[in-house]
Amino acid sequence: MPVGSCTSITIKDKRNEPLEIRSCSREDLSCLLEMYATFSPRPASQGLPPEDPEACRRWVQGLLEEGENFLALREGRAIGHVCIVPDDQKRDGEFLIFVDRAHRNRGIGHALTELALNRARELGLASIWLTVEIYNFRAIHLYKRCAFQTCGKDDCERKMVCTL
């Protein structure tokens, strides 16, 4: 898959349906807010995306300002969002991903994750980390397929890291 420096790629999901994956910026705020306004369940994980519309707006704005963001779109509508929030001093970054429930299990999360990991490599990051609810088996399976490894856990969540 092309690396993060490209502006847009078109791929087919597991159902052979096309979708566009592209980088996104502040100009995509309304597109992301539309996706998160109907996102289910809400909050999906660890209080994200925020339920309150204004809190959600501030959260998305922060991701767009501080992170490297990519969108998955179908027919112009956002169906997936991935973000890496880099910490240049530590040479790592936090990883966040959300895929609309109706579009899960189609390889979209995998494509977004691979693109984000490639972008993290371009940025010179040494690793990417995330936290995931301990019973979110589907997400954990995806992360393991993309070379994330568990590096800590408690009763509610686990921390996983991908060394780049």
Image (cartoon, helix red, strand yellow):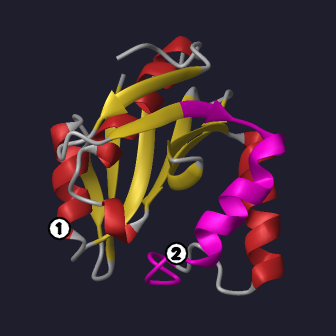
**Is 92 left, or right, of 33 in this rendering?**
left
**Secondary structure state at the residue bearing disc 1:** helix
Of the residues shown, which amino acid type is indicated by label 2? Phe
Residue 39: give its label. Answer: 2
In the displayed structure, does residue 77 sit left or right of residue 45?
A: right
State the quadrant of the N terminus: top left
Q: CA distance from mark 2 to mark 1?
A: 19 Å
User: Where is residue 152, by image quadrant?
Assistant: bottom left
Magenta stretch: give its range.
Answer: 22-46
Q: Is residue 60 visible?
A: yes
The answer to which of 16 and 111 lies nearer the viewer is 16
- x 18%, y 47%: residue: 15
Look at the image and tell me whether residue 158 can be seen: no
Relative depth, front residue between 131 and 16: 16
Callout 2 crowding tier (Cα within 10 Å): few <14, some 14–19, many ≥20:
some
Quadrant housing the C terminus: top left
Q: What secondary structure is marked by label 2?
A: loop
Q: Is residue 102 above or below residue 163?
A: below
- At 23% from the left and 50% from the top, the residue drawn is 106
Picture coordinates of residue 97, whole percent (x, y): 46, 53
Q: Position of residue 59 (x, y in %)?
A: 74, 64
Q: Which residue is mark 1?
A: 137
Say above or below: 89 vs 66. Answer: above
Q: Is residue 135 left or right of residue 57?
A: left
Residue at 25% across, 71% down: 136
Q: Is residue 38 magenta?
A: yes
